[in-house]
Image (cartoon, rainbow, N blue to C red):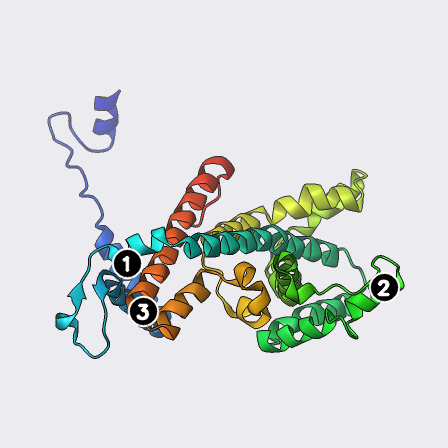
Amino acid sequence: MIVKALTENGVTANESVTPRPPAKRNSGFWKSVVQQKYLYLMSLPFVIWVFIFSYVPIWGWLMAFQNYKPVKSFSEQKWVGLDNFKELFQDERFYLVLRNTLAMSMLGLIFGFVVPILFAVMLNELRGNIFKRTVQTISYLPHFVSWVVVGGIVYKTLAIDGGIVNDLLLWMNVIDEPIQFMSKGKYFWGVLTAADIWKETGWNAIIYLAAITGIDKELYEAAKVDGAGRVKQMFNITLPGIRTTVMVLLIMNIGHLVGIGFEKQFQLQNNLVTDYSEVLDLYALKYGIQISRFSYGTAISMFTSVVSVILLFTANGLMKKFAKESIM
């Protein structure tokens, strides 16, 4: 059979068939670069920006292994090895701050992640385009308000004298006297999570609304023909249709569990709730800038970055194994 096929194609049995050399991958890459040179040139400024501001500063991590003094050059710094990290893990304050960071991160991951999804799905169910666009516009406007302004709004809203929340609770006979929300640590995590949800829900819902618009409309028409109501369409078409987007954003949010920033905590905190409001970034700012312990502050920031990378790869691996979704 093989000899006959070779003979029919002009190759005798005694002739050897020379295999084709494998295509060079490098030539294919450079060919695509030449073909899409304008796209690569457009992306070049952003690559340079990321390299300068995200990779070059990693050089500063060496400070974590030194007793850094700004008046001395790099070669004159005293190397202390892992002393800063040993001191960090022996500090009781560090574990208190880590508790606060993880608690607020988990609350933000649960409510700050789920609420925008539910909001986007419910907003998609609205039929009036004018009303739908109005609600969407109003919902994402708080994103553009600075946390300085939001902090003032939260303090005014929860004030014991003239605060709308206390006045409403008193009017409904839920409480007998005003609650000092901003001076009791047990309320701080809930207040901060609620403020963050109010500020970011509309903005975070935009990406889910964009994913919903990419779902084939014929699926909804077919579901209607089969007698599926709007609730069944939501659970069987809309939510599965944005599954990939949800998984990708979930992985990215898990990677930021210990790196949640400090701006909102800084604006809402006061001396009465410091034990509940201080997070790792505030802890690093306090020791690195205010007390001028630059090496210790760098060690804190380095710990945050390393743990964030570990969480990101772990979440990506688990999602890839069990949910068949990943970002890399």
**On screen, 167 above or below 84?**
below
Q: In the drawing, what numbered circle is on residue 84? A: 1
Quarter of the N terminus within the rendering: top left
Q: Nearer the viewer, residue 243 or 308?
A: 308
Q: In the drawing, what numbered circle is on residue 205? A: none
Q: Residue at x 62, y 47 (%)?
A: 241
Q: Nearer the viewer, residue 313 or 83?
A: 83
Left or right: 318 in relation to 234: left
Q: Amino acid at mark 1?
A: Asn
Q: Residue at x 79, y 70 (%)?
A: 164
Q: Position of residue 111 (x, y in %)?
A: 63, 53
Q: Position of residue 78 (x, y in %)?
A: 16, 66
Q: Which residue is mark 3?
A: 293
How far is disc 3 from disc 2 in space, using C-alphas? Answer: 48 Å
Q: Secondary structure at mark 2?
A: helix
Mark 1 is surrounded, within 10 Å at the Cα level, by few (under 14), some (14 to 19) or many (20 or more) other residues, namely many
Q: Nearer the viewer, residue 236 or 167?
A: 167
Label pair 1/3, CB-CB below 8 angstroms: no
Q: Amino acid at mark 2?
A: Leu
Q: Secondary structure at mark 3?
A: loop
**On screen, 8 above or below 78?**
above
Q: Secondary structure at mark 1?
A: helix
Q: Position of residue 178 (x, y in %)?
A: 78, 65
How far is disc 1 from disc 3 in space, using C-alphas? Answer: 10 Å
Q: Position of residue 105 (x, y in %)?
A: 53, 54
Q: Nearer the viewer, residue 232 or 186?
A: 186
Mark 3 is surrounded, within 10 Å at the Cα level, by few (under 14), some (14 to 19) or many (20 or more) other residues, namely some
